[in-house]
Amino acid sequence: MLTACEHCGAPLTPVEGKNYLLCNYCMSFHFPQAKKDGVVPGNEFSGHSCPVCAHVLVRSTIEGMEAFYCEKCRGILLERRNFSRVVELRRAQSREGYQDYVPTPMDLSPRNLKCPGCRENMETHPYFGPGRVVIDSCGSCHLIWLDPGELHRIESSR
């Protein structure tokens, strides 16, 4: 995680809607490496804990949209509106083309995950789109939790 400017040591600030950071002291730009799933971790902790492993989530961006990322279990927390936009953008630029998945049973057993926003139980349900993914969401906070690989399955399926 990039925490300070490589040139002057000042704190870095995420640039809204972009996948890079700005040093407000020397005005230099910093481009952190995107993770395999396309998440660009920011330089500050969010104050939220991961609902799976309780590690502190890092403010991040994915496709220029704000997200929260667990660097331990690689889960992604998104606001519902950002989730929709990220899926739309990633499907539009998918280089792999669509894949056909062989239907497999989905595990719909409740996971008892606590919402990082309100600490109430998240709902476990199928994503009602392609990818045969079971997601966790909070209706009160409008947050969606994606386990590692789920976003890729959603974006690359019909």
Image: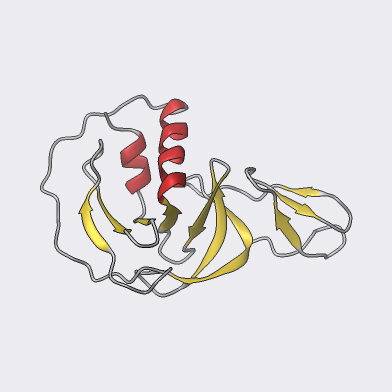
Q: Residue at x 66, y 48 (%)?
A: 16
- In the image, 69: left or right of 97? right
In the image, 124 versus 154, the foreground residue is 124
- Whether 68 is drawn above or below 120: the answer is above
Q: Quadrant of residue 7?
A: bottom right
- In the image, 63: left or right of 10? left
Across and down, in percent, residue 96 comes to 39, 27
Q: Quadrant of residue 114?
A: bottom left
Q: Which residue appears farthest toward the left when viewing the image?
A: 105
The quadrant of the rendering that contains the C terminus is top left
Across and down, in percent, residue 104 comes to 12, 43
The quadrant of the rendering that contains the N terminus is bottom right
Q: Residue at x 70, y 64 (%)?
A: 3
Across and down, in percent, residue 49 comes to 45, 72
- Whether 33 is drawn above or below 49: the answer is above
Q: Which residue appears farthest toward the front when viewing the image?
A: 140
- In the image, 100: left or right of 105? right
- Whether 104 is drawn above or below 69: the answer is above
In the image, 34 versus 44, the foreground residue is 44
Q: Quadrant of residue 122?
A: bottom left
Across and down, in percent, residue 129 comes to 25, 37
Q: Residue at x 23, y 41 (%)?
A: 128
- Whether 99 is drawn above or below 33: the answer is above
In the image, 139 versus 78, the foreground residue is 139
Q: Residue at x 38, y 56 (%)?
A: 142
